[in-house]
Amino acid sequence: MNIQKQVDKDHYAFEQYMQKCRWNSMWHQLDEVIKLKPDRVLEIGPGPGVFKNMANLFGVKVETLDLDPDLNPDHIGSATSLPFPDNTFDVVCAFQMLEHLPYETSLDAFREMARVARKNVIISLPDSKTVWPHSLHVPRHGAVYWLMPRPFGGARQHKFDGQHYWEINKRGFALQKVVTDLSSVCDLIRTYRVNEHTYHRFFIFSVR
């Protein structure tokens, strides 16, 4: 498949791209990667490069790959044919990227991520299921968070909007299907939605 870039560099302008909820999601990106103490990390689809720059501040070496040279990635190439030998990176990650590819193509990209990863693969994807976040402060324990799903309404049909070809919990892309397909490549350690930005769901995998 001939993959073309979907947006120009201006799409990542601070005032329209970096909402507070996205900052919260980026905290989880950093937290998940730093906890693994990797020596070498590859990020596919770096956007404006915020994750790489923040990770570098905390001593994590991140290399980036994108097909758009205007984003100044460290490597220019396709996610479905990564230009690296097997087991090159300790951790390979892609945050809110795979949904920009048709579903079967995104699975090809995920298999490539697993191929070049030595230990872990971390991704986040959009989850369209409506949930309502709640929190409660418990003395001596701190804040407790939980998500309450909307009790009514089925899965909606996804319509390509020029960027997303699919989203979790849209019709035909139930969470269990996505988990099963991804788990056929890597072992799923955990998945969760970000309380401060429930549209983003994280998946942490270990490489077989």
Image (spheres, rainbow, N blue to C red):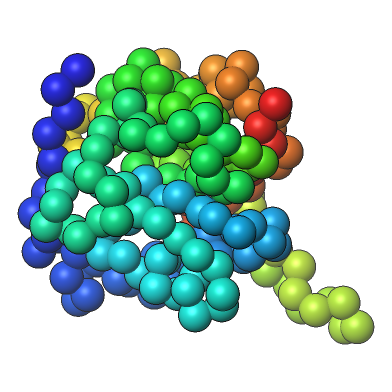
Say which residue appears at 87% left-offset and 77% top-offset: 141
* Residue 122 in sight: no
The outermost residue toward the right is 140
The correct choice, above or below, for 150 with respect to 185 in the image is below
Q: Determine whether, in the image, residue 167 is placed left or right of residue 89.
A: left
Q: Nearer the viewer, residue 9 or 127?
A: 9
User: Toward which corner of the image does residue 134 lie, by quadrant?
Assistant: bottom right
Q: Nearer the viewer, residue 174 or 45?
A: 45
Say which residue appears at 52% left-offset and 30% top-offset: 86
* Quadrant for the N terminus in the image: top left
Say which residue appears at 28% left-offset and 48% top-offset: 75
Q: Residue 165 location, x and y as percent? A: 26, 29
The outermost residue toward the front is 85
The correct choice, above or below, for 158 with respect to 194 in the image is above
Q: Nearer the viewer, residue 117 or 196?
A: 117
Q: Determine whether, in the image, residue 122 is placed left or right of residue 101.
A: right
The outermost residue toward the bottom is 139
Q: Residue 132 location, x and y as percent? A: 55, 55
Q: How many numbered badges does the structure rendering display? A: 0
Q: Residue 67 location, x and y as percent? A: 20, 42
The correct choice, above or below, for 200 with respect to 162 in the image is below
User: Toward which corner of the image does residue 112 lie, by quadrant?
Assistant: top left
Say which residue appears at 56% left-offset and 24% top-offset: 182
* Residue 2 in sight: yes
* Quadrant for the C terminus in the image: top right
